[in-house]
Image (cartoon, rainbow, N blue to C red):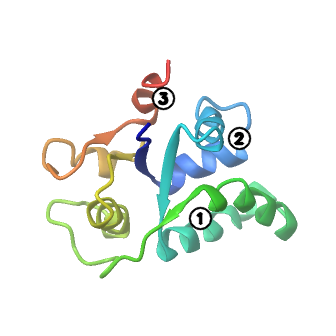
Amino acid sequence: MNRLRVVLDTNCLVSALVFQHSRLSTLRTHWQALRFIPLGCRETVKELIRVLAYPKFRLSRQEIESLLGDVVPFFETVEIQDAYAPVAGLRDAQDAVFFHLARQSSADALVSGDEDILAMQGICTTFPIVRPTDFLRSFD
């Protein structure tokens, strides 16, 4: 069985990891059940660590490490080039890394709820950009 190889943006990962009763918490269940393969790179993992350390989450270093242990072992790690090179039409340059990761890894999809990323639907033809709820429906 070929599992989908998917780039999840940081917000999807944080929602799945931190908010256990959120609608996106089932993403974690699906990657841990090996229903899809989350793709990551050095830059996206660093971004995830940075966001998990935000004071608003009130996570200790040990809690952050535990959350990372719930996702990083499931990642297919990809070495990407020029992680923040501009992407034509992308409104937020910081989101470029997700496009480069998806393109360079030949991802089956980029899953995001970020409006700047979603605005690229129809413009980006290399891979589909899907909302998390739509992606989760594929497992129903």
Label 2: state its secondary structure: loop
* Image position of 105 (left or right of 68): left
Residue 19: which disc?
2
Q: Nearer the viewer, residue 50 or 45?
A: 45
Quarter location, residue 132 = top left
**Residue at position x 65%, y 43% in the image:** 32
Q: Earlier in the sequence, mark 2 or mark 1?
A: 2
Residue linked to disc 3: 136
Question: On the image, which quarter does residue 34 sit in?
Answer: top right
Query: Disc 2, disc 1: CB below 8 Å?
Result: no
**In the depicted structure, whether residue 79 falls above or below residue 65:** below
- Front tag of 2 and 3: 3
Image coordinates for residue 49, horizontal then vertical, percent: 64, 69
Disc 1 marks a residue whose amino acid type is: Leu
- Mark number, residue 48: 1
Of discs 3 and 1, which sits in the foreground?
3
Horizontal side of 28 relative to 129 (left or right) equals right
Between the C-alphas of marks 2 and 1, the distance is 15 Å
